[in-house]
Image: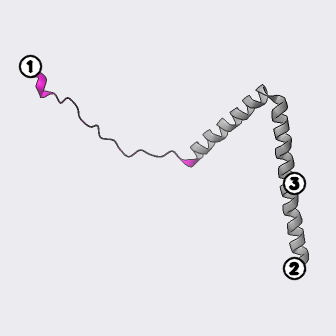
Amino acid sequence: MMTSFYSFVAFHEVSVYPKKELPFFIVFTAGLCSVTALLALMTHRYPERMSEIAKVVRYTNIHHISNHIGKKKKEECKIE
């Protein structure tokens, strides 16, 4: 059985089902893994600079937390 060359459709649109979004947990885990790998690579390549950055981040976090605790204590004193 011979079919004609012209009987074939040159182009047809493939039906595309709605794409299912990835669950948040998978996206979050992938992002967390990527950030951790990037920090490890940067720490390996530039240890002195990354230790300076870590000290700044640690100091900033401790400073903000201590200010927040101090404000709570002041508010508690005002209420009493």
Q: Which mark is residue 48?
A: none
CB within 8 Å, label 2 to label 1:
no
Q: Which residues are magenta?
A: 1-24
Quarter of the image where one finds residue 71: bottom right
Does residue 4 show up magenta in the picture? yes
Residue at the outermost bottom position: 80
Q: Position of residue 33 (x, y in %)?
A: 66, 37
Is 15 left or right of 74, judged from the image as shown?
Answer: left
Q: Closer to the N terminus: mark 2 or mark 1?
A: 1
Q: Is residue 71 above or below residue 19?
A: below
SS for tag 2?
helix
User: Which residue corresponds to the image point at 56% horizontal and 48% vertical from the top-left?
Assistant: 24
CB within 8 Å, label 1 to label 3:
no
Q: Which residue is mark 3?
A: 63
Is 77 left or right of 39, judged from the image as shown?
Answer: right
SS for tag 3?
helix
- In space, the residues marked 2 and 1 are separated at their CA atoms by 94 Å
Which quarter of the figure is the C terminus placed in?
bottom right
Q: Which residue is mark 2?
A: 79
Is 26 left or right of 8, judged from the image as shown?
Answer: right
Q: Which residue is mark 1?
A: 2
Q: Disc 3 vs disc 2: which is toward the camera?
A: 3
**Mark 1: amino acid:** Met
Which quarter of the figure is the N terminus placed in?
top left
